[in-house]
Amino acid sequence: MSPNPMSPNHTQEKLVYMANQIGKGFTMRKPEQAVLDIADHLKKFWEKRMLAQIFEHLDAGGQGLDNLPKQGLQRLRETMQ
Amino acid sequence: MGLIHEIDYGTKASTSTKLVTLKIDGNSITVPEGTSVMRAATELGTQIPKLCATDMLDSYGSCRLCLVEIEGRAGTPASCTTPVAEGMVVHTQNAKLAKLRKGVMELYISDHPLDCLTCSANSDCELQDMAGAVGLREVRYGYEGENHLGATKDISNPYFQFDPSKCIVCSRCVRACEEVQGTFALTIEGSGFSSKVSPGISEEFFSSECVSCGACVQACPTATLMEKSVIEMGQPEHSAVTTCAYCGVGCSFKAEMRGEEVVRMVPYKDGKANHGHSCVKGRFAWGYATHRDRITKPMIRSKITDPWREVSWEEAINYAASEFKRIQAKHGKDSIGGITSSRCTNEETYLVQKLIRAGFGNNNVDTCARVCHSPTGYGLSKTFGTSAGTQDFDSVDESDAILVIGANPTDGHPVFASRMKKRLREGAKLIVVDPRRTDLVRSPHVNADYHLALKPGTNVAIVNALSHVIISEGLADEDFIRDQCDWNEYAEWADFILRPHNSPEAVEKLSGVPAETIRGAARLYATARNGAIYYGLGVTEHSQGTSTVLAIANLAMLTGNIGRKGVGVNPLRGQNNVQGSCDMGSFPHEFPGYRHVSGETVRQIYEQDWGVSLSAEPGLRIPNMLDAAMDGTFLGLYVQGEDIAQSDPDTKHIVGGLTAMECVVVQDLFLNETANYAHVFLPGCSFLEKDGTFTNAERRIQRVRKVMSPKNGYGDWEITQMLANAMGMEMHYNHPSEIMDEIARTTNSFAGVSYDALERLGSIQWPCNELAPEGTPIMHIGAFVRGQGQFVIADYVPTDEKTGPLFPLLLTTGRILSQYNVGAQTRRTENAKWHEEDLLEIHPHDAEVRGVKDGDWVKLASRAGETALRAKITDRVAPGVVYTTFHHPFTQANVITTDYSDWATNCPEYKVTAVQVSPSNGPTEWQTSYMAHSDASRRIAPIAAE
């Protein structure tokens, strides 16, 4: 689903959309490698308030997040702790 | 200080390695075989009289002025068409030759107006010079015979006039149009006495196919083709070599001046990017620098609904700094950021990112490359190890198959397109991958061997299908792959590529390109001795922009087309300094030299040099800045030379973000669209008014030289420095060369670059350091920068921007030759005469079913918004595809584009928007209200009486 620009949660919806896009970019890798690559990509390119917002969303159940990016985010958070 | 004159050797240099020794007027000289006698004589310092010869063109031998005598040979051959020979003995001057030359000149002058004193070419006329050189004192034939002196002038072109009464029919203009520009707009009409130069079939220049590149004007030895600026102002008295501020070709020009006024810009023959050629923008469209719209005084306002108030520099800078500090104190140091400009110099861009990283204390810096070539940086860095093209422009001279993907160089990069077309005329093959039938697909003397007119958004599928054919038909260069790439990675990638969904037959269903066409194109590229890829924004500005760059890099490695002349992967950069702005650390995750901010070593280099601690975390990209602004966490922005309100996608979102900010500082030549939402306006200066460097698409660093005082009082680098000091960050550079010295000492790929080195070498292609002290024209020779080339799997993922019953057409956007980017510069020149408004190209079938006629107003609607513009019915676009440019703010093409973006870099998906087109009565309500808002926003309050 594309983010709805009129939504009050536009930024969060957009971040979920972007994370899923990144996930698709790495889909053809082996799953474990894809998770690492997604985590690495998010760490390298996402600013901290973007990460904070998506982690918050992840904590709330991560609705809309595909499996690979969800795992990538979990992996990233583990490495950041 | 005087005029710079390059030597005209009369004929081109020979590239032969075999040497020949001869004697000219008793002096011995050794030159390469194939050199003309005329050129050899010039190299000795002997000027043989000439009129039809010039070293930009092939030898022609028509004027009969350059005759010489050669011992042992009969007659008096033309020195321009006679090649040297071992032991040849040449005499360039004797009584017989003098008589012959005088006779030739008598004939020319008998049909030429004798108005030298009032002629615009007075003191710059080769005919005048030759009359002097041969000692012409009388014309025995008189001047009363039949002549051309009453011929009518053609003044239709806004930049130059054609006065046939002064024409000597030497054909230099016609040959320049053919050989240098490759447009074939001029011809010699008629024969004998009635022969004359004619644009098209007896058309005026303006309405002909002439593209106003200026090559004919430059080639003309008389005042027949002359710049109107010279006619008006007189001959220039001094000049300086500088670099064009338009596209990423980076043409060198001589700015020819009278005092501080530009008389004309003449392409510099020794410029290594352009070799003396130019286009209508660089050659003629420099008048914006003194346009009446230029703002030269700083201005501030509390609210964007207020009129502007002119203030002193001190007040404007202090106000901007105090606002930024106030916002940071209240909302944290990450609440502000900035955008660097790809139109400004390397030094200026470097300073802006330094101010943000070291002064603002965050990495919230981005640049307009975000919306053009950010996927190039990511993709080529991953696969090759460097975020830049692999070749120099000269490389195309040795290409045998040229693959152009998503680029329209005849409009976007015209001077390089002329080089490419020349190579095509020499026999190179051409594959064009583009939804539109661009001029490279078919135009005079250019006929692409394959045109893959794909459905927008299917680039990855097409490029993977090309690789599929190459592997499945055994055309891969396995020796290259084993030698220079990781074989295991290749094997994994090849296994993916050979899957059925990458076959031409499967891709035909997605892309609309017949499988056999894909197969033919793949075979052509793979079997050529040298295959070169050139690509543009039609590759990058997609949700899969990065994937296409990866797929292109894979294709080049697969065929071994890397690491030598004639091959490579070559992104055609849009703006003059996009390459440089990226090199200079304009992205929020990288320091200069493409080094990630998390790297301890690189951070220490800057922390030591700048004396502050720096953030190790990436900052916000432009679209994320605007999202954060809407969320209330990003409230201050410093924008140098960038107009995001016009150039970035989904205008309503951009406007929403800018409106939400508390302090927007715009530094620009004009009150651009972004300035409508600004609180501080800092007037910028043009490329003519400052020193610095630009880096072009071939990584070539070239000098920009100040030829006039800044109309606003300061160079852009000085303004950034003032802002930095007001923010409490000490900056005390005295000249941009000091900034370049800092860049060199902190960035290894620039380590050998300095203004002294640029003065000595003319230009330098990075990397330039201890390993390559004079730069690197071609990269990855023998090994990739990253070690082994990396094959990266890039699968096709359809865009989420889908057509459907409500939006059944696909809109793609691009540029036109006469206009540049958002048009801020070119719209303020006579170039506007060629393109007064953006038009919507629509296929006749799509137009007919909608009842749209050529020139009608149509409404163009997408899920993001709607606008209206006039329709142009053409089969350049395929059914189902429409196309427009984005040069005019009134059109607001980016109201239509969505905020879909590339998965890896957030580069917007400008090239695919689902739209509907319907008849309209005129502009939309949004356009009308936007223009009213724009007018109101540009009000400047009258200065109160003392």
Image (tube, rainbow, N blue to C red):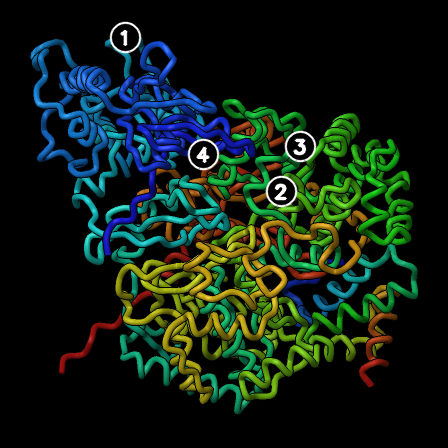
Kindly identify which chain the residue marked by label 2 belongs to. Answer: B
Cα–Cα span, label 2 and label 1: 44 Å
Kindly identify which chain the residue marked by label 4 belongs to. Answer: B
Q: Residues within 10 Å of mark 1 (few under 14, many from 20)?
A: few
Are dots 2 and 1 in contact, CB under 8 Å? no
Note whether residue A74 is visible. yes
Residue bearing the label numbered 2? B534
Cα–Cα span, label 2 and label 3: 11 Å
Residue bearing the label numbered 1? B192
Are dots 3 and 4 in contact, CB under 8 Å? no
Q: Could you tell whether B390 is left or right of B125 in the image?
A: right
Amino acid at the residue labelled 2: Tyr
- The dot on residue B753 is none
Q: Residues within 10 Å of mark 2 (few under 14, many from 20)?
A: many
| Residue B686 spot, x, y in % from top left | 35, 60
Q: Nearer the viewer, mark 3 or mark 4?
A: 4
Residue bearing the label numbered 4? B30
Q: Residue at x 8, y 35 (%)?
A: B117
Q: Return the disc, 2 or 3, that comes first in the chain's sequence.
A: 3
Q: Nearer the viewer, mark 4 or mark 2?
A: 4
| Residue B626 spot, x, y in % from top left | 57, 70
Q: Residue at x 59, y 80 (%)?
A: B606
Quadrant showing the N terminus of chain A: bottom right
Element under disc 3: strand
Q: Return the disc, 3 or 1, that comes first in the chain's sequence.
A: 1
Amino acid at the residue labelled 4: Thr
